[in-house]
Image: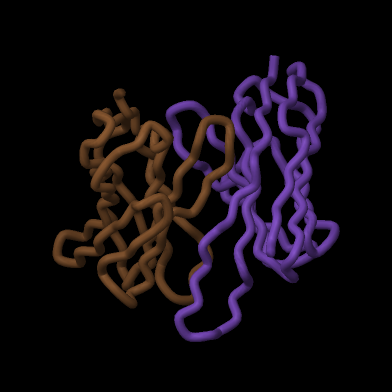
Chain colours: A purple, B brown
Amino acid sequence: SQTIHQWPATLVQPVGSPLSLECTVEGTSNPNLYWYRQAAGRGLQLLFYSVGIGQISSEVPQNLSASRPQDRQFILSSKKLLLSDSGFYLCAWSIQEGGLAGETYEQYFGPGTRLTVT
Amino acid sequence: AQSVTQLGSHVSVSEGALVLLRCNYSSSVPPYLFWYVQYPNQGLQLLLKYTSAATLVKGINGFEAEFKKSETSFHLTKPSAHMSDAAEYFCAVSAGAGSYQLTFGKGTKLSVIP
């Protein structure tokens, strides 16, 4: 079965410090990977998604970046955190488009990272 | 483009009462629809999905949802609420077959009163 891991679980960082959040998926190959942010009262905001190694699409302009150095590893980074970067960060995966009739691409989420920028 | 509207950011029900969480969608193509549940400080868990096979979809934990094309709705129901159902629920839509991006609603927080 597939498993998705995120770490750290919680993080408190000062404004202006760097950030690195990691997400790894087990039990599947060549997944689509996603980073979301959940801020209080604002639902889920898609930040980045990736359909393959080195392929990153950004949905929202901001001071965050993402990288996919390996097939099942997705990293969210920042060089200098802002107060507005506080939130709950969720990684998710889905299967790749395979062209099979009836295939669905529901996303499976990790446990999340609670980031507080002080 | 797809969009989702969840009516009611907060719903309270008594234990044992019917749970009804509303979701309306907008899609230019036949949609796939999903309901997720999120417990405090956890990730989202898939409850059920609609992919055009059957309009009434049964999910985990006794939840079900009915796709009504004429009403562009996909409301989530459960006949009898349990205390353990207290959580936030998200409706999501994708642009049907071949589309892997989901558009989420803003969520409905369900409280269950003993």
Residue B112, x across and y down, in percent: 32, 29
Direction from residue A1 to residue B110 in the image, left or right: left
Image height check: is A116 above or below B52? Answer: above
Which corner quadrant of the image does residue B2 belong to? Answer: bottom left
For the C terminus of chain A, the quadrant is top right
Residue B60, x across and y down, in percent: 43, 55
For the N terminus of chain A, the quadrant is bottom right
Q: Report the residue at 38% width, 45% height from top.
A: B105
Q: Nearer the viewer, residue B64 or A59?
A: B64
Which corner quadrant of the image does residue A36 belong to? Answer: top right
Direction from residue A96 to residue B36 in the image, left or right: left
Direction from residue A45 to residue A94 in the image, left or right: right
Q: Report the residue at 74% width, 65% height from top.
A: A27
Check the image and name the residue furthest to the left.
B70
Direction from residue A78 to residue A96 in the image, left or right: left
Check the image and name the residue furthest to the right.
A69
Q: Nearer the viewer, residue B49 or B3?
A: B49
Does residue B62 appear anywhere in the picture? yes
Check the image and name the residue furthest to the top.
A118
Image height check: is B39 above or below B59? Answer: above
Residue B24, x across and y down, in percent: 25, 52
Q: Report the residue at 80% width, 37% height from top.
A: A20
Does residue A57 appear anywhere in the picture? no
- Circle count: 0
Image height check: is A25 above or below A28? Answer: above
Q: Report the residue at 77% width, 38% height from top.
A: A7
Q: Nearer the viewer, residue A27 or A54?
A: A27
Residue B75, x across and y down, in percent: 25, 52
